[in-house]
Image: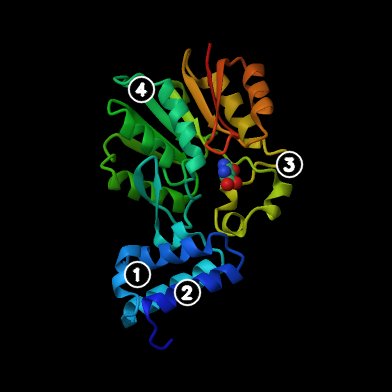
Amino acid sequence: MSEISWEAFLKQAQQKLADAGIEDARDEARWLVRLIGGVSSSDLIARGDDPIEASARTRLQNALQRRVAHEPLQHIVGETEFFGLALTSDKRALVPRPDSECVVELALETIPRDADYALADLGAGTGALLIALLKQRPQTTGTTIERSEAANSLISENLTRHGLENRASQFAGSWSEWTGWSICDLIISNPPYIESAVIPTLAPEVREYDPMDALDGGADGLDAYREIISIASTEMKPAAWLVLEIGYDQEAAVSALLKENGFINLIHRKDLGGNDRAIAAQQP
Ligand code: GLN
């Protein structure tokens, strides 16, 4: 591409993003300029007419092309923020969502400030949930359970990034193979919970770029809950907490599963969008 100014690129990017059906095309164009080009909105006022230097231009064009193909901005930037923490995020795992912050908040309600709890995160993905808990509760230790090799490498990077490699271990395998359930005081999970038939209707950013294993909850979306709750009820120790992210329409079904399996003291919480999103329950 030939020479182009920052302002002209911004306009062109906004147009291409809008043409691709991306909402908030204006904001997204600005984010690209800021995060990939390193030029803030206030810099733009002074530098808007300057030509973009060749290497930045190439980076911006590549990033724009990827975003036009609906790749999530987080993958393109390689980074996201979750619970105030910068995390590496890319195609190796589901992009942490702001909605999941309420699951962390609910878990924190059950962990006293100075508790030396043993924690675990089932299907940890980026490690976001466990990392947020470990950061908020300095006396705790934890384990991520993750069967995807790619996600495990990402978790390891994120643990190191936050200086947690000595407080966390990683189990590379499925939660049914893992044998640590009985030592945990709290287990958290954002399992796959989308009904298989609904997946084709999700935004392309989700259905084409988040790993399918992190989304597909089977015919009724509840396969992972049935498995987790059944193992948890026989393996977890008395008074231990299980804290789960749920889909907006799954509160009744997951509550029923928890009660059928003997869990008590159920609490649920909504996300910022007002949807049911988190549920906690305790072993008797
Ligand atoms: N909340 C995710 C979504 O945006 C789904 C995550 C999951 O299945 N655990 O659809």
Question: What percent of the width, then of the height, locates residue 272?
Answer: 52, 37
Q: Is residue 213 above or below residue 19?
A: above
Residue at the outermost front position: 45
- Tell me the residue at 28%/25% (across/down): 139
Outermost residue to the top: 284
- At label 4, the amino acid type is Tyr
Q: Quadrant of ligand 1?
A: top right
- Asked whether residue 185 appears in the rendered view, the answer is no
**Badge 4: few (under 14), some or many (20 or more) residues near its Cα, within 10 Å?**
many
Indicate left or right for 41 with 277 as reference: left
Label 2: few (<14), some or many (≥20) within 10 Å?
A: some
For the residues labelled 4 and 2, the Cα–Cα distance comes to 52 Å
Instruction: Give the residue at mark 4.
Output: 117
Disc with the residue nearer the chain's start (1 vs 2) = 2
The reply to whether dot 4 and dot 2 touch (C-beta < 8 Å) is: no
Colouring mode (rainbow / by chain / secondary structure / one colour)? rainbow
Tag 1: amino acid:
Gly
The circle on residue 11 is 2
Mark 4 secondary-structure assignment:
loop
Residue that numbered label 1 is attached to: 37
